[in-house]
Amino acid sequence: MSERQEVAVLCIGDLEIDFVLREVRRNGTPLRVGSRAFDILELLNNANGELVSKDEILRVVWPRTVVEENNLQVQISALRKVFGASSQLIRTVSGRGYKLLQCTSAVRAECAGDTLPDGARGTSVDDALVTSNGGAVDLFGRDLTLAEVLTVLKHHEMVTLVGTGGIGKTRLAIEAARKAGSAFPDGVVLIPFSSVTDERFALDAAAAGLRMKNSSGPLSINTIVDAARGKRLLIVLDNCEHVVGTAASIALALRNSGHAILATSREPLRIPDETLYPVPPLVVPDAVSTEDAVMLTGAAQLFLARVKGVSPEFTVDKKTVLLIGAVCRALDGIPLAIELAAARAALLGMEVIGNRLNDRLRILTGGCRTAPPRHQTMRATLDWSYRLLSDIERSMLRRLGVFVGGFTFDAICFLTVDLHASAWETLDAFCGLVSKSMVAAQLDGNSRRYRLLETTRDYALQQLDDNGERNAALAMHARYLLTLLGEAPVGGAERTDERRLADFTCELDNIRAALEWSFSSSGDPSVGVALASATVPYLFDQSLLSECCSRARQALAVYNSTMDSEIPSDAVLKLRASLAAGLVYTNGPSHEARQEWMNLYAEAVLQSNSEYEARALWGLWNAHQFSGEPKAALPMAQRFSDLARGRDDVMQSLLGLGIEGITLHYLGDQPQARARLEEMLAACDQPADRSSANRFGIKHGIVARAALSRVLWVQGATQCALELAQSTLQAAIDYDNEMITCYVLVEAAIPLAILADDVVRARHAITELHERAFRMSFPIWIEVCACYEQCVAAMASPNPARLRVFSIAIERLAQTGFRAPLTFLLYRYALALAKCGDAMNALKAVDQVIKHGDVTGERWLLAELRRVRKMILSSRGNEPFYWRVKHIAPPCTDTSQHGDSVHAIDI
């Protein structure tokens, strides 16, 4: 067990964290910390200061539930709020995860030394701090970073702070030198290279920093070393990137002479024993942070301090604080960018700044006149870095500006293939961009992804425009993504469907950007149609149904208007199939959805494309089944099975068994339904078939088990049915697909819990459905969720007012066209009417449901409906008549004679 794990109580400032009692106390008083938040805290603590990935936290803290990343962010924000002044101990590692840091007593002791010894040589670090930062001396949000630098300096004597321009390297180095100065008998020397315009004059800057007397002899590194001989100094070499060769030689010579070196540079000096410390951005608030959580972050504190410094009357309310958080997040926590934005906000207001961050380089100006020119605007900072790049590095950086949300090395190679550079030259150029802090690297599983900070990306795009290259780069970007999602392997390696889905998930922001360009006036619509056809099946699989439909419509509109012969026919079929499938879930199984499936079927038959003919038949079956019309759905299922047998397609034949079984269950033929479902599941469970278990993006084995649980219930195996429904729900959650999870909840988990009168289980399942349906914007399941909520409420407390709400919910569901659950819901509604004593209307409701079944063929509840009808008839006249509800009455029925409130449900 690690040392930290053995500690039962961890003390941080005035906090005590008791891992035995699972309690956090401040000055002995327990604080309110949720169980999830404490689980995360314990996990971070046990990592001994190491990074814990987001995936690991989600896996450990939510082991049986699929949650969004913002759930994790909410818990982290809650922990930071509890930590208060020590909130920065919870460090966010952008795009990767979190770690819990501690400032040791040794570091605190070092941090206490605020003054430099009298014998210090060279430029005063206090003066340098004022000069380099326009008079600002506070380090907001840098306590832990400063402590880490001091610890590194204590153990290593050649330390280089590296990072992008404006990240705060100089300010951090000078403050670290101030704190560490007492450890060096002869003090601290600052050698700034920022004003050196030519590397030849770097030695002069070093001599000036050491306050060397003028010498008649030539200046050399040896004379520099001689001037510092016999002393023990901490020498700060500031802004080395543009004189990196000479700076490296000076650092090495002085280090070999017994001095400690603290350098700042946008790239490493690459000398022996150099220890690199990448300066992180300031912690920024999460998108879901509360007002208090925003103000606990260093980025927001810096912003507010700077804006107040310019405009003391600047007022802060909740809206302003949240805007500050959004601006800091958009600026990636870069201190210089935050300070420049604050200066503008003081003059223009927060809303103006927030609305104009899409033009960062123009808005981020107005730095202090006493700051170096390169720190007075963000563009000047980036110009400084850009000039230090080689020609191929500049070309590469410009093209990387088209990527949104990150990229891989394969993507870089694809976009730079026309630069007439060898593979090694491309690799060297990219490594140069990373080492010069122009590209940020982040670990993504076992591989690396890269990204440009947003201000750098804006700069790269403007450079593309200035060089007339933007449209060509965007075209290559779109073609790369088309290749990535298509059949042709990228990088020479074949990829599985799972790998392609993972690629799609990572590149979704890039794909959206490429589609927007492709369909723009300057884009390539044929590439857009091809890319959309490759994209929409993944959007459907990821339950992004509205976007799936809109992208498919957009592409089909382009195709219909151009009839471009270069667009493959199967691409058009894929677009039609995805649009039709998405419509069923967004608009319900409406006439439009059925018409789209019919169009697909006709086109597939015309092209002799049996694969899409089968998809169309499946879609038509699904539309009828969702509409509550099993009699009409059965022929579609049978034709699907016949087609599969004719093609000798084993998996499609199994799917045919599954959809026939579902329909036969609704038709009331439980023995045949069970036989088909069990035959399908037995075959799907064979190892040889597991690799092909997915069809049309849905794991139909889970769907079949949900149907089988209903069959078992009707056949009287109630306990087996409940257990199967519960295990099927867990399988759906593990499968991590929102559509299939909602399907299992709607079709099996919730109705069987209601049939079992298990209110607790039903409410838990309804909560799951509510969360997922609203998060993914599934209209049909939002409406059915409302019905189930009212159904359970009526079970607990049946009364006329509640039944009226229940009836309205059923009517709203019927209007969506998703009528598969109606028979069950109306059956429960009739029971509730009977419990309220309204036997007459309860009887009418049951009779209407039975007649509805005569039309649609739905018979799975027929025996229960007849039992309930008999029960109502036997009790009629023995219970009080409370209220009158006209149930499922034809629109022409005259209701004026009733004095009571009348509400009709039309199906």
Image (cartoon, rainbow, N blue to C red):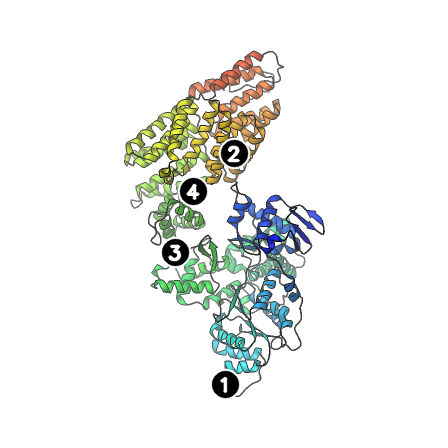
Find residue 614 and report its horizontal and vertical position in percent. Answer: 33, 33
Q: Tell me, yes or no, if residue 819 can be seen here.
A: no
The quadrant where residue 114 appears: bottom right
Q: Is residue 248 left or right of residue 575?
A: right
Label 2 close to label 4 by CB (< 8 Å): no
Q: Residue furthest bottom?
A: 216
Label 3 close to label 4 by CB (< 8 Å):
no
- Mark 1 near mark 2, Cβ–Cβ under 8 Å? no
Q: Position of residue 385 (x, y in %)?
A: 48, 66
- Residue 464 disc label: none
Q: Which badge, 3 or 2, is on the more N-terminal residue?
A: 3
Of labels 1 and 4, earlier in sequence is 1
Residue kind at label 3, given as amino acid type = Asp
Query: Which label sits in the foreground, 3 or 4?
Result: 3
Q: Residue 410, which numbered label? A: 3
Report the label total: 4
Query: Where does label 1 land, which residue?
Result: 218
Q: Which residue is mark 4?
A: 539
Sort mark 2 into few (<14), some (14-19) or many (20+) by Cα contacts within 10 Å: some
Please identify, in this view, whether the residue under mark 1 or under mark 2 is nearer the observer: 1
Q: Which mark is residue 782?
A: 2
Frontmost residue, 555 versus 26: 26
Q: CA distance from mark 3 to mark 2?
A: 42 Å
- Residue type of the residue flagged with mark 4: Leu
